[in-house]
Amino acid sequence: MRRVSFLIITLLCLLPSISPAKELPKIAVWDLTSGDIQGGYAQDLTLILASEVSKAGKYEVYTQENVRTLAGWTAERMTLGCTDTKCLTALGQMDISKLISGRVGRIGKRFSISLSLFDTRHARAEKVISEFCQSEDELIELMQAAARKLLGEAMVSPSPQMPAQPQIPPTRPSAKISGEHLYDDFSKWDSSKWEGNKWCRNISQGKWAPRVKNGYARFAIDDYCWGIIRSKIFINKGQTVTVTLTPRLRSGGINDDRALIFFSTTWVRYLSPDAIGLVLDDSGVVKVWSLEKGDMAKIGTYRPGSAISVSLTFNDDGTITMRGGGGTFKTPSAHFAYGLPRIVIGEKDSSDGFDLHTVKISQ
């Protein structure tokens, strides 16, 4: 099995949806433990399990690492598992309604996969299954079948169908977003719906936390926030998305915008194997970011009073090409383990409000 990891610094967040569509319930997929099998198999099968759950389109999937950064738990704490009442209750407080945990092992010459589905609201196991096969070569198909059995055949799509291409109208009128929002105006595909999230850091407490409805981990003072929107339309291979940002200048022509533009499949903060994109930093330089490599390439430079336009292409070979006024950068092959990516835009929320005035999305 091939082990793939692609990490990039991102700042994402949780905020009441700005879309009228109902939010998906959240489910956590815990890292599988392993028995007498090759070490990397459990990690690879965990990604396959998360992918199968995501294909259903019924849940917003959180990995164990997502939960760790969300809750601020230590790595040592995560090794204890999350099947006890205290941990399940904590997930419920984070608005994560379900948890899947399991084990991959071998008994004699037979391989086994055991999965458990937990209800975090009531801190109890809903369903436990075990599946068996004769060869390690059958583990991938066995995991896919086990996921379908655990959630019910109707919950998981029988095959990873590619979503239909969105019909792009000849004109894209601007639309106002009411209530708490990221931007004064933004133009988009008429057929696209947008989700919104917010992630804030409390300076006095020295930690990040989501803004959630029930008050859990909600900060009231000393907030430093990032706001994010992502389109519900998926990006197919061969598609290019162009994003144009028009920052609002402060009095005296000063601007300290920071913005993120990237492809992603999950709501995560900092670490994600499923995110690749660009950042506009405080100095006005548009760069490609990677946690492992830092600044990989300069794409363009922002000039006060002008718009910033960049394009991201999901190539047929799985690579991502990013273009701007200052150059072009092509990533190595990107591995979107949780499905097709979406376009995501984020911006730092400073004390006097959002700085991005207009966002235009086109193909």
Image (cartoon, rainbow, N blue to C red):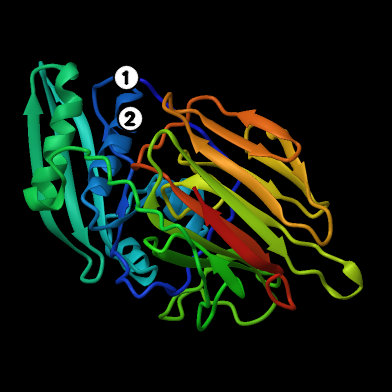
Q: Report the side of 171 relative to 186 (left or right).
A: left
How far, Cα to Cα, is label 2 from label 1? 7 Å
Q: Which mark is residue 1?
A: 1
Q: Is residue 186 above or below residue 269?
A: below
User: Which residue extends farthest front?
Assistant: 170
Nearer the observer, 286 or 359: 359
Q: Helix or strand or loop: what does disc 2 sit on? A: helix
Type of the residue with mark 2: Asp
Residue at x-position 41% and y-position 80%: 214
Residue at x-position 20% and y-position 71%: 122
Q: Position of residue 43 (x, y in %)?
A: 35, 32
Q: Position of residue 130 (x, y in %)?
A: 9, 39
Is any part of residue 324 visible from this angle?
yes
User: Which residue extends farthest right?
Assistant: 252
> Mark 2 — residue?
44
Q: Mark 1, residues whose alpha carbon is within 10 Å: few (<14), some, or many (≥20)?
A: few
Q: Quadrant of the N terminus?
A: top left
Type of the residue with mark 1: Met
Q: Are marks 2 and 1 in contact (CB under 8 Å)?
A: yes
Nearer the observer, 286 or 323: 323
Q: Is residue 244 above or below residue 187?
A: above
Q: Helix or strand or loop: what does disc 1 sit on? A: loop
Q: Is residue 20 above or below residue 69?
A: below
Q: Position of residue 341 (x, y in %)?
A: 42, 44
Residue at x-position 22% and y-position 40%: 161
Residue at x-position 29% and y-position 41%: 51
Q: Position of residue 159 (x, y in %)?
A: 16, 37
- N-terminal of the pair, mark 2 or mark 1, is 1
Is any part of residue 77 visible from this angle?
no
